[in-house]
Amino acid sequence: MPAVERPLIYANLRQPGYTVDIDCYLRHGGYDALKKAVAMKPEDVCKEVETSGLRGRGGAGFPTGMKWKFLDRKSGKPAYLVVNADESEPGTYKDRQIIYKDPHQMLEGIAITAWAIQAKQAFIYIRGEFQHGAKILERAIVEAKAKNFLGQNILGSNYSCEVVVHRGGGCYVCGEETGLIESLEGKRGYPRIKPPYFPAVLGLYNCPTIVNNAETMAQVKHVLAFGGAEFAKIGIPGDSGTHIWGVSGLVKRPGLYEIEAGKATFGELLYDLCGGPLDGRKFKAIIPGGSSTKILKFGERFKGKLPNGTEFDWALEDIPLDSNSIAACGTGLGTGGTIALDDSVEMIQALSNLNAFYAHETCGQCTPCREGSLWLSRVSKRITTGGGMETDVPLLLDIANQVAGRTICAHGEAVAWPVQSAVPKFKDEYLESIRRRQRGEEVNGLRLI
Amino acid sequence: MVTDNKPSLVALNVDGVEYQVSAGANLVDALASIGKEVPHYCYHPKLTVAGNCRMCLVELGSPLRDRATNELVMENGKPKIGWQPKPAIACATNVSPGLHVRLDSPTVKACREGVTEMLLLNHPLDCPICDQAGECKLQEFSAEYGRGYSRYVDEKNAKPKHTKLGPRVTLDDERCILCSRCVRFCNEVAKDPVLGFVNRGSYNTLTCFPGRELTNNYSLNTVDICPVGALTSTDFRFKMRVWFLKQTSSICTESSTGVNTTVWSREGKIYRITPRRNDAVNDTWMSDSGREILREVDAAHRITAPQVRGAAADLESALTTAGEILRAGAVGVVGSGHQTIEEQRLLTHFAQATQAKAYVPARAGSADGLLISEDRTPNFRGALLAGLTNRAADRDLSALKADIDAGRVRTLLVCREDVTTLGLDATTLAKVRMVYLGLHNDATAKAAEVVLPALSVFERSGHFVNCQFRVQSFVRAIPGPIGTLPDVAILARLLGSVTGQPAAFDADSLWKDLAAKQPALADLSPSKVPSEGVIVDGSAWANLSFPEGKLLKFAPATKA
């Protein structure tokens, strides 16, 4: 059976004539879930989300209900809700659709979440480049306040919550939750050390804070609309709801595909939905969930055991599209931003491109990430420009090993994982790239050095 | 004497060996307390934890507990240890009971090697021309924990060099390892947030904010805490290799705070003064102005030789003349808060022997709430303990002037104070014969019949009592000018000349005398004064109004 989409988040925004104004949203049943939520006790809303099994959509896939449970409610300090709309992972463009085309869906989720955690102030930290998106959101907030879905005394519940849109300064690390908090406080976007600065305890202004991804907010709306138990039936146990796959790169039909978790495979996504590789080409590898996730190579066999004990033996095409299955194959679902690479791609150039990105985006606060990312970039760049040595290939891996797991935030892993996964899989090709340049051969029709 | 309450101890397991350390202590400090060094750059015990250098990565574990029963999980009769999957920074870890640490594992070794290699990638490696060489953490840890060779063949970053951050501090950004100690110091201690990083990633650059300068009076502390040669003292740089310098423990004479210092000297010349850690007095800080006091030694107006009636004389004849003058009677004595307690004690004896009234003038200044107090003398409390005075410091010498004008005082012994600034004008001074034991060729020296050279704090040893009534010792760092004697020797000679008996001036005799006569100093002797000083009971003077307000480690007693 060919894979089919199950639009949930994108259900409305894909309809012809759907607009961003609140009237259009209300015609599509908008804010009904919020009405349902404020009629419930906040802790019951939390319970619904926990029951739903919803996992965060920011990349780490942390269970949303559990995250809310960690919120320190004993400190007596106000709690804040921060929505991470700093979508900047290369290959990822799913949140942008929601913000630009269906802002009220996200705002409704924000209002529900704020009610659940009893936050009186919510912030939307939006990527600086989403200038127009910020305006759309601001207009939507005004509309929602006028209809009493936000602001003072929401829907007569005696509960008030203000939402502020804050535009980022254009930095990848400010998508890391504690870097985001620092940036929101007006400081340099340096991620904080954990411990002690776990956002749920010492977050924004050192108050308990929940930081959730933009799409997660939209998902929360549907959790309430369906009810937790019903929502949990979408997808598979352990990963409920839909995943939005933003496929880019060398496929016939790149784009966004919303698929029920675990109900299709990479093969179905790439061949059925995306139309397969370009004519005359063959797939070589995919980066499954945004540039930081570990690369998968076509032709690899993936063997192991799922968390529920099921043993598996898959080709890349067979891997089901759910968090646990993808994690069991040594990579991650991440943000679902899949980048497809075919046999026209020279892998060292792809790696060099990624390394340059991470070297440019490291905040430079802690040593391994700051120095390691630039070193990786310089070595891989040197290889592509003909100055490579065969010792550079093991060196790349060694540098990455010195970064991963030793940094303040997960940017260290983001720097290291592409290298740690690609070097063992494409070692021979890298060595050949070095030798070809030493021999003065042409690369991609260009004679390099 | 006040005893500290010992903090409670907990067990800390380091590489399989159990130790007892203070509960809740920072792991870096706790390990240091049992002699285990954890290399670190960004961590500083007196600043907030930044956790950015990653040099102190260690492996941490704690006893596992059963989730259902909360009982310890046992393995071979011992609690089973759950080790964290990733190394953690020791500086952001506080000691909890049963904490297990691995310092000597392949992972920890690899972490240190990795961080060291990374830090050196873009470092200029210019140790041969770097002032920090010899006291550089990067140099030390690279030798201790580094690989010994570099695998880096690409170009290094170029960054600004010899930038003047302010009047006293010079920055070399290529040497900077971005530990942010200086930034945190300016924000948290000096409360003068002018430093920050610009640019991003490996191109991060330390700088002053636009239009700002690092001008605050604590700016040189950034140089002290810089673990590498990025921040250097504009005054000290290129002057001397630190390994040639002798370190002597001293006390800053800037104010009654009594900041603990280290004097760095070579062959009789002082090159720099740095703070010495004392958690009860100055933490690890000192003022820039306090470091400038070393200029006193070679100051142009310094008295380096005795004078009799304006003409240079040898010390022996000057002392003889001084004795003759002082034996004439009707003596007045002006002591100083800049004298040591030993000198003040001898002066007390002198005043008693001559039935002279003693004055200790105040030197008032403005305070900064940190380490500079309103009382700009290091030892006024010493004058109280020594019995030289029993009242608050004299704001002027009008009482003495009245005595002189009335002919009740005809001879004067003045120590270290320029009495012309305290109300004794030339007309008044013309009525007395004056012996001046002083440091500077000031108006008092010109009016004095005999001028005896005093020694600076760096040239003599002794004890000061700070505003907390903390007795602190300092040691001679360099010899005084040729032909001079320590102040105690001179005062003992003057005392002897009025009593006819030779007076002892060795520390033992002076302290025996102090301990016998002053209950607050009973049982105290120089050997019993620890390096952090010792607080003595000053309650006898609780009713005096002292000028000091709140300081970093001092709060004035609230009067009932």
Image (cartoon, rainbow, N blue to C red):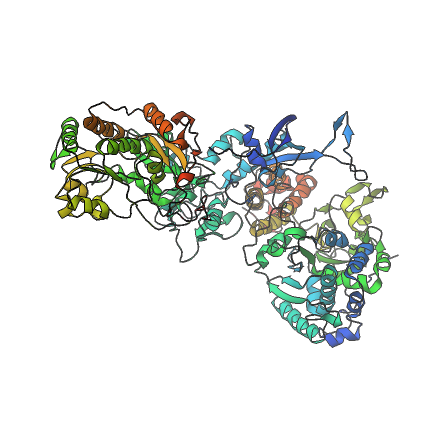
Q: Name the residue: 65% across, 47% down.
A: A347
List x then y, in percent, for residue A316.
Answer: 78, 47
Which residue appears farthest toward the right when viewing the image?
A1
- Residue A253 can be seen, yes or no: no
List x then y, in percent, for residue B553.
Answer: 46, 43
Q: Name the residue: 71% across, 64% down.
A: A110
- Residue B231 can be seen, yes or no: yes
Q: Is residue A60 above or below residue A99?
A: above
Q: Name the residue: 50% across, 46% down.
A: B180
Which of the pair A110/B316 is nearer the observer?
A: B316
Which of the pair A182/A135 is nearer the observer?
A: A182
Which of the pair A36/B309 is nearer the observer?
A: B309
**Residue B444: quadrant of the picture:** top left
List x then y, in percent, for residue A121.
Answer: 65, 63
How many numbered badges does the structure rendering display?
0
Q: Is residue B175 above or below residue A43?
A: above
Relative side of A32 to B295, left or right: right
List x then y, in percent, for residue B193.
Answer: 46, 53
Image quarter where the N terminus of chain A lies is: bottom right
Relative side of A202 to B425, left or right: right
